[in-house]
């Protein structure tokens, strides 16, 4: 069982789908209960997996590698390192909370909705577990379908526009990614004589500089759209504003991380030279995202689109941390992926709670909620502070490491990014002030009920995580560090990069590899010509 | 006992958690007891560890305690670690001591507010953050306290959140502080990547090796840290939040915005004095900013009519003195003034609180007057504080201010101009302070009849703290008497081990330099005392004996008066140059760049696609004749092509 833990965690939600299919669609309570219980057990399984995970060991753990479609070299290959471990746990926790948050607000086509939620969970966890590009791609696309329905069927007034926009953007990116995957497979075949979709093998594959640029570009576009990196972000505010609360939570909490995860898992180790080549452009786009997202967030009139634009800004931080290409930067970025999932997830849940009460999210419709909903105001405050990155909340640890790493990589980048810290305080506190402080000006707000026990049940775990990571992030950082060092070892093939402290690299081996890479003989090119015919 | 160092911040944290989690479920008495007891416990332990530290020989007066690793990442290893040395020992005594007095005062002050629980919750959280700030053994843990006190300041300024002015002021404080923190952060980054550690001990040990004295790197670091200090300690150009912070309850103004939090910048510079000693240019900037701020804020204080605003600008001004002291490399003088200031300024604020209480929440001094005979304890204690801040010999403020003035003149890093600015500011200080005293406690009673009927002295829980602080304001300075009085300056010797070893210039040098300096010191002292007395006399003439004179002068210099009354229009300037353009630019980014350009491109490409499909669709007419025509055309072209080829 232990060796199959990844399969179990990934596909356990399918059990819920099967059970739900057997239940008549009007039995809402049983459907909801099954969905909640199944996702809860999935969460417990992911905790168990966390407990079994060896924080010291290098490389992938719980690896499963079974030939699947042998003629094409496709394997059922799963395995996780510290990065994917934490993202899986985040996914399973947010799924439970998202399902809980839908309890009352989703009234139509209940069965379809909860089936979509569980299917989405399968897709998300699958992406984080996959070590085979084929599986990775399949899970990547599997996520798309339920998300499309969640936005398009259970969303707001402009849900169709938002859903189609979301799908088209993502599809556009993922098609290019598919082409790049196929290219890699053929390149590997001409290099080693056999087909393979194996990510780990691709990391050992020498790829000439030119093709690397195209391949990196194709993957990076798919991931950048997902992140979303400026200027590919315009699907995000629409999708968030139209999606139901749970959809926004999953979208912001997990789906955006697919992009940054893809960069860390695929782009950096497989295309190290291209990473260095693209680095300045991506860093500049990240910086624009940080500042631009914050400024545009500041003037939003709808709380939800404010949070959406703040995500653009925060994800810019994460991208910058990754492309700092040093230990602190990437570690901070990975931790910040978790943090952003927690705090932005919490923010969307909170926005959902006032939306359920008032059926509006316009900032001007509120004011003085501290008076009528003091407990709610407290939760909101803590989440806001976490989003601002106040020390002793989770946001600070990640942001600090990212900025520290970015500063090392490039002083100017570090300084510009750090100014984003000021802006985040501006837009969040201004919004908080207008929603929570002041006098109750609207009569509709006078009788609002404070958070109930179900809502507390949703928010308390998130608040605890916020403080836990803020005060004692060591267990997480300990698990992230070996994985990040591994990534950096691959990146260090591109010798011009300062790979940061604390990394032991076999110098001789690295030099050899560099020679192969820079050598004139280029097996990949031969392969690519063969492919075109 | 030193093993229990962590208890000092822990007790207020427990108080915060108890009062916070059980908010609204505890009776008032229990809330008060939890809040005050937690601070009292912290104070008692602070006293105990102070004596333990004192028992050690001076050169080994350091007690360290590491709690656990906070952020480990490669070579970055940040701990939750505490450091008790003579400097932090002074700070924890001031913070817990004054903090305790103000907590007790608050019981009476906040008694009529239904939100007392929330108030004490925030206050305890503040104590925790402040104690973390001063006890931290590394920059990043200090930053935890640094931002923590900023948060509490934000929460407490906006305590009466239903008032827009209050929540505005809180937000302003937080954001302006964040601007300062930005500098602090960058400074930390450079330190870390140069030294490889953020621990004070390591950084201070390594700094002389790693950095070239007077080099641009160390100067940059010090200036960046100083940006942080100007934010927290309300110096030019980031002082604008502090006057607005008076929207908070008065005990908050006393504790956070006078006695403790705003002095954090001074503490930080004293803590990193080794770095500053390596960067004389940065020191000069600190001194100039301090001196200018001291003068600038004092001029604004001359014209303000809100009793708390006078005190707020006075605080900015006095903080300027402390920075002046640090800037002339006399860090212990800065810390000494920090301590005495925390006594007398806390007293002034609490006294003002008592006045406001008596006046049914009136804060405008133009509607006060003659209160001296109604609220005697408040009057006498505030008078003591006024004499102290003005620098009347014998009171604590005299010793600390005089020390700064003398050092700004005599120190290697000093300059006579610094002394002149400090000297003039001392005169202004005495004037605005006694203007406050005379307008409030003397002269005609200008309040309306209903308010007059309600004038009453505050309860014991408020007046006893006033009396305690009054005593401290008098005697607190006696531990730092100058050498020319023929006594040993305990305070300076106490801090000596913390201050940069070789480069620090002990006062004995000045003495050794010859009798002329001693004569000079007496002379300058006499001059400043004389100026203070003259200023008090003028204040008495203007605001007590001949009020018509003040009116006449105001008319004569109405232009200058308007500028000062409107605080040099700095807020308006920031609004017009930074805030509004930023919002307009953001709106432009959203409405134009995001919606029209980027999304326009996205939706436009969809429209183009639709249009092209639409026109291509028209080719599919379904009529055989047109297909046949096209077919013929195609054949002709193909044939033509092959024939030509």
Image (cartoon, coloured by chain):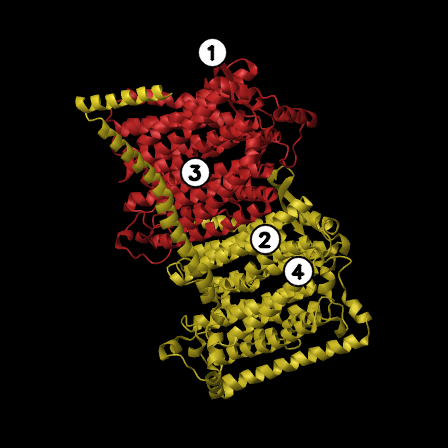
Chain colours: A red, B yellow
> Would residue B264 be seen by someone viewing this image from the given angle?
no
Give the labeled residue for mark 4: B282
Query: Of discs 3 and 2, which sits in the foreground?
Result: 3
Circle 3 packing at 10 Å, graded few (<14), some (14-19), many (20+), is many
Dots 4, 3 in contact, CB < 8 A:
no
Residue at disc 2, secondary structure: helix
Dots 3, 2 in contact, CB < 8 A:
no
Query: Of discs 2 and 4, which sits in the foreground?
Result: 4
> Would residue B366 be seen by someone viewing this image from the given angle?
yes
Question: Is circle 3 on the same chain as circle 1?
Answer: yes
Q: Give the Cα separation between the discs numbered 2 and 4.
A: 14 Å
Question: Is circle 1 on the same chain as circle 4?
Answer: no
Query: Of discs 1 and 2, which sits in the foreground?
Result: 1
- Quarter where residue B423 is shown: bottom right
Q: Give the Cα separation between the discs numbered 3 and 1.
A: 35 Å
Query: Of discs 4 and 3, which sits in the foreground?
Result: 3
> Viewer-proximal residue, A34 or A264?
A264
Question: Is circle 2 on the same chain as circle 4?
Answer: yes
A210 sits left or right of B480 in the view:
left
Residue B285 picture location, percent across and down = 64, 63
Residue at disc 4, secondary structure: helix
């Amino acid at each position: 069982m232990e060796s199959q833990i990844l399969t179990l965690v990934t596909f356990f939600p399918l059990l819920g789908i099967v059970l739900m299919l057997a239940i008549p669609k009007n039995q809402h309570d049983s459907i909801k209960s099954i969905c909640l219980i199944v996702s809860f057990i999935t969460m417990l399984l992911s905790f168990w997996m966390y407990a079994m995970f060896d924080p010291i060991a290098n490389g992938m753990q719980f690896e499963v590698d079974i030939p699947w479609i042998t003629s094409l070299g496709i394997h059922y290959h799963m395995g996780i390192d510290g990065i994917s471990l934490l993202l899986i746990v985040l996914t399973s926790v947010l799924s439970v909370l998202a399902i809980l948050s839908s309890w009352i607000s989703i009234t139509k086509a209940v069965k379809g909705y909860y089936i979509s939620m569980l299917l989405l969970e399968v897709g998300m966890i699958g992406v984080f577990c996959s070590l085979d590009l084929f599986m990775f791609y399949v899970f990547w696309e599997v996520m798309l379908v339920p998300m499309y329905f969640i936005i398009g069927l259970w969303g707001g007034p402009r849900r169709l526009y938002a859903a189609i926009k979301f799908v088209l953007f993502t599809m556009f990116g993922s098609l290019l990614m598919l082409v790049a995957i196929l290219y890699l497979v053929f390149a590997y075949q001409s290099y080693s004589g056999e087909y393979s979709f194996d990510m780990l093998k691709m990391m050992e594959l020498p790829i000439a500089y030119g093709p690397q640029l195209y391949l990196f570009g194709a993957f990076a576009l798919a991931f950048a759209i997902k992140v979303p990196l400026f200027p590919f972000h315009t699907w995000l505010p629409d999708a968030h504003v139209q999606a139901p609360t749970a959809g926004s939570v999953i979208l912001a909490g997990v789906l955006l991380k697919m992009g940054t995860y893809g960069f860390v898992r695929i782009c950096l180790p497989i295309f190290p030279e291209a990473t260095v080549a693209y680095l300045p452009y991506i860093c500049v786009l990240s910086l624009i995202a940080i500042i631009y997202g914050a400024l545009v967030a500041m003037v939003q009139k709808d709380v939800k689109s404010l949070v959406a634009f703040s995500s653009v800004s925060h994800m810019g931080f994460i991208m910058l941390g990754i492309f700092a290409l040093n230990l602190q930067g990437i570690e901070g970025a990975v931790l910040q992926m978790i943090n952003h999932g927690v705090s932005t997830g919490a923010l969307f849940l909170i926005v959902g709670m006032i939306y359920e009460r008032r059926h509006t999210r316009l900032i001007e419709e509120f004011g003085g909620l501290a008076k009528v909903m003091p407990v709610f105001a407290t939760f909101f405050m803590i989440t806001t502070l976490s989003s601002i990155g106040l020390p002793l909340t989770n946001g600070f640890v990640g942001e600090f490491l990212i900025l520290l790493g970015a500063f090392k990589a490039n002083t100017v980048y570090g300084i510009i990014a750090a100014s984003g810290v000021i802006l985040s305080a501006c837009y969040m506190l201004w919004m908080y002030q207008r929603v929570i402080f002041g006098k109750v000006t609207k009569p509709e707000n006078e009788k609002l009920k404070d958070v109930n026990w179900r809502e507390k049940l949703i928010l308390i775990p998130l608040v605890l995580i916020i403080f836990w990571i803020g005060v004692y992030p060591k267990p997480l950082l300990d698990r992230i560090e070996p994985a990040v060092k591994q990534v950096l070892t691959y990146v260090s093939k591109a010798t011009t990069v300062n790979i940061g402290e604390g990394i032991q690299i076999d110098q001789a081996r690295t030099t050899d590899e560099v020679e192969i890479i820079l050598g004139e003989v280029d097996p990949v090119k031969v392969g690519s010509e063969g492919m075109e015919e | 006992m030193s093993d229990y160092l962590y208890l000092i911040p822990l007790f207020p944290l427990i108080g915060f958690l108890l009062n916070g989690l059980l908010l609204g479920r505890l009776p008032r008495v229990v809330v008060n007891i939890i809040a005050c007891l937690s601070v009292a416990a912290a104070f008692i332990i602070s006293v105990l560890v102070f004596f333990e530290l004192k028992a050690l020989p001076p050169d080994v007066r350091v007690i360290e305690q590491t709690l656990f690793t906070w952020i480990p990442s490669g070579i970055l290893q940040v701990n939750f670690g505490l450091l008790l040395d003579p400097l932090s020992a002074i700070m924890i005594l001031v913070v817990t001591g004054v903090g305790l007095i103000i907590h007790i005062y608050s019981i009476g002050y906040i008694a009529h507010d239904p939100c007392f629980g929330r108030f004490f919750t925030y206050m305890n959280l503040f104590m925790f953050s402040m104690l973390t700030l001063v006890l931290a053994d590394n920059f990043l843990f200090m930053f935890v306290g640094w931002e923590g006190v900023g948060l509490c300041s934000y929460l407490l300024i906006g305590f009466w959140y239903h008032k827009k002015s209050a929540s505005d002021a809180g937000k302003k404080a937080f954001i302006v502080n964040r601007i300062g923190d930005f500098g602090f952060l960058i400074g930390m980054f450079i330190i870390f990547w140069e030294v490889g550690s953020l621990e004070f001990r390591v950084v201070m040990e390594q700094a002389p090796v790693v950095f070239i004295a007077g080099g641009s790197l160390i100067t940059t670091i010090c200036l960046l840290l100083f940006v942080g200090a100007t934010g927290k300690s309300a110096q030019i150009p980031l002082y604008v939040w502090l006057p607005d912070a008076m929207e908070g309850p008065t005990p908050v103004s006393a504790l956070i915005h006078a006695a403790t939090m705003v002095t954090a910048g001074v503490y930080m510079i004293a803590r990193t004095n080794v770095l500053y000693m390596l960067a004389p240019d940065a020191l000069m900037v600190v001194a100039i900013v301090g001196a200018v701020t001291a003068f600038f804020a004092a001029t604004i204080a001359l014209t303000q009519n809100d009793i708390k605003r006078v005190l707020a600008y006075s605080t900015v001004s006095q903080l300027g003195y402390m920075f002046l002291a640090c800037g002339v490399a006399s860090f212990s003088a800065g810390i000494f003034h920090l301590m005495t200031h925390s006594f007398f300024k806390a007293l002034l604020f609490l006294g003002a609180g008592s006045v406001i209480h008596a006046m049914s929440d009136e804060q405008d001094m133009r509607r006060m007057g003659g209160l001296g005979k109604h609220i005697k304890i408040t009057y006498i204690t505030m008078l003591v504080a006024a004499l102290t801040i003005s620098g009347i010999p014998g009171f604590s403020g005299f010793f600390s201010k005089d020390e700064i003035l003398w050092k700004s003149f005599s120190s290697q890093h000093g300059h006579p101009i610094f002394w002149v600015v400090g000297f003039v500011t001392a005169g202004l200080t005495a004037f605005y302070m006694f203007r406050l005293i005379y307008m409030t406690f003397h002269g005609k009673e200008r309040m309306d009849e209903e308010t007059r009927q309600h004038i009453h002295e505050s309860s014991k829980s408020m007046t006893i703290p006033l009396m305690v602080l009054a005593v401290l304001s008098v005697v607190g300075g006696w531990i730092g008497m100058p050498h020319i009085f023929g006594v040993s300056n305990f305070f300076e010797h106490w801090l000596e081990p913390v201050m940069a070893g070789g480069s620090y210039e002990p006062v004995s040098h000045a003495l050794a330099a010859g009798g002329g300096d001693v004569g000079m010191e007496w002379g300058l002292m006499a001059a400043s005392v004389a100026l203070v007395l003259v200023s008090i006399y003028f204040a008495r003439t203007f605001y007590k004996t001949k009020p018509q004179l003040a009116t006449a002068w105001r008319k004569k210099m109405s232009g200058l008066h308007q500028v000062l009354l409107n605080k040099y229009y700095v807020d308006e300037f920031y609004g017009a140059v930074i805030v509004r353009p930023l919002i307009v630019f953001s709106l432009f980014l959203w409405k134009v760049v995001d919606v029209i350009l980027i999304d326009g491109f996205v939706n436009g490409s969809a429209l183009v696609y639709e249009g092209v499909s639409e026109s291509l669709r028209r080719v599919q007419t379904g009529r055989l004749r047109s297909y046949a025509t096209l077919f013929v055309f195609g054949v002709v072209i193909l044939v033509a092509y092959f024939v030509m080829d």
